[in-house]
Amino acid sequence: MEGLFTPAMAINFRRRSSLSPRWRVIRAKMTPGLPYHRFSGLLVSQGMRSPNLCRAGRRPKQAASTPAHRSTNRAPPTNSSPSANILKVGTNIPSAEIQDHVIRITASPGFTNAVRLRELLQYTVGEAIGGRGTSLKESVLGVAIFGRKPGYDSETNSIVRVEFARLRKKLEQYYESEGATETLRIVFPKGSYAPEFVRPDRAAETAFAGSVVVLPFTCLGNDPDDECFADGLTDELITALTRVPALKVVARTSSFTFKGRMDDIRGIGATLHVDTAIEGSLRRQNDQLRIHVQLVNVLDGCHIWAGKYERRLTGVFQLQEEIATAIVAALKMEAPRHRAAARAVDPEAHALYLRGRFWWHHWNPEALRKAAGFFQQAIDQDPMCAGAYSGLADCLFLQGFYGYGRPRDVMPRAQAYAQKALEIDPLLGEVHCSLALLENAWGWNSQQCGIQFRRCLELNPNYAMALAKYATSCLTPLGRFDEAIVWLRRALVLDPLSPLVQADFAINSAFRGLDEEFEQEAARVLEREPAMVKLYLFQTKSRGVLGNWRGAVEAAESAMRHMPEDPFTLSYAASAYARSGNAARAAELRGKLDFLAQIRYVPYATLAYAHEAPGSEESFFRFMEQGIAEREPLTRVLRAVRRFSPIASEPRFDMLLEKVGLSDQQVAQVTAIDLAG
């Protein structure tokens, strides 16, 4: 392992440099961070002996080779210093890898509310990548980051030194917790403000770093309902593990990407950035359940722990908690947060609930109707089935949100079912996420929306959906796009393969005016998920802002190929054609919307957006007023999308914002919510 020429060594040798011309030549070429072998070469080039030790700083001894640890429940010993086990490699690390690494750091919980530290890290890393690391002086940072006037007295004003101490501590905490599996480290040597980028010495690290993916369980029976049961058990085990604060648990969407596939476990670990995976199989026979579970180290494919369970179906909840507790114990981590004692389950009601969740995850109108039917049957069978009330609330919310039902008919019912679920099980974290979404879309109360998200994440710290929805349903309507992107990054850490979160991440760039970045990110998502229609819809807006109406129309046509009868799609397409100058095509699409409105509920807000073009202002405001009267969720995006609107400068637009609780004054009154509690 190659050492570096440290600041302490530099001070010592600079003192010597005054003694002879040869030392002065060396001084001119040496810098802190110089690889030791290059420093030694400088000595030899001047006819001097290369010393083994330096009085002010010794060369690190070669670390003894460490045998690879087998996958057992015991982790190898670790060095108490978080930066002691690093392999320093200089600056040959790709800048893109460093930038991605910084994104993950700044999206972590420790940096979420530390705005100044995020700026400090991003600025110093950017300067170092750009080859300007030597310019990172205290006086420069005071002006660039902390707003001090040029020439300020850095001796008496210690803000840079104080904040850098905080930054170093935050980085240490990150690498000791959720960043323990990172293959890169950012280190600020003592006395320097220029970062070093180093590789960790894997041989000296612990075998497990608190990250796991629960792969979909396989069902060994022939009953078609067994697949629903296996998926449901996987879901509930993921939920149980998300209650462990220090454990990174990959979300369902990314986990189920591997359903039915025979991928190598090492490749799965590398794709999802986890150290361990849970695999399992189950067999149902009458009211008996047999489950095999194993915890695997993805680095070498060896088993860490395995268990076999045989239970009656009435004890399935207790079984899930038992498996989760055993896995956490095998990982030598803190036990899951306290849960109320699990009650006996009605097997038939539980089976109906799992079938409901199976269909709910398909997220289309027909699937939502099927899911709602199964949840209602589960409630009829067992009126104390909290999960079924929660699921029914989610179905009704989505029907109202996407215009499959009239909001006034479905949203109050969704709220009532969510509250009933909480009465039965106050620790059901996902219900608080449902209530948060309702507070934004139906209650129009951003403050309560944030409070509900906070309670959800107190109960389920690793609930990726809550992290993403906090960004899109609480911060984005307020126009707080820079904050929203931080939470979307956190969601992607837990759910890296989710096309929905990836799409929301791309759309955030459009909201922030980063149209070129949005196009690049949208293209990456659409390459994998060509039916992600909402990206095409935002392409119509983003390209229109740039005057690329031909591109906007192309995006509209792409959206209509996938969802030709969808009111949202027809609305955005009509607006694109109207603003591109094709009035005939715009009128044709508006006619389709009018026809649909005669046979089913079509949100007034979609009719308004179809008329969002010069010359159609009166129709836009008339329909939007009707949408507000119906309390349609789509009216709550008015503030977020106003950069795309040709009529946002009208005073009447500001009046609309006030009616939906999103005027400048109303937004300013929404206090920041500390999701850490």
Image: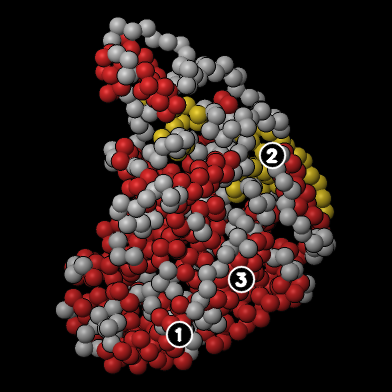
> Based on the displayed image, in which of its 4 quarters is residue 208 positioned?
top right
3D distance between C-alphas at marks 2 and 1: 48 Å
Tag 3 secondary structure: helix
35 vs 620, nearest the viewer = 35
Residue tagged by mark 2? 331
3D distance between C-alphas at marks 1 and 3: 20 Å
68 vs 178, nearest the viewer = 178
Residue tagged by mark 1? 660
Q: Is residue 336 above or below residue 59?
A: below
Q: Position of residue 129 (x, y in %)?
A: 32, 40
Amino acid type, callout 2: Leu
Give left or right: position of 362 versus 461. Answer: left
Residue tagged by mark 3? 452
Q: Position of residue 372 (x, y in %)?
A: 61, 73
Q: Residues within 10 Å of mark 2 (few under 14, many from 20)?
A: many
Chain-order first, disc 1 or disc 3 = 3
- The quadrant the C terminus occupies is bottom right
Give left or right: position of 140 versus 379. Answer: left
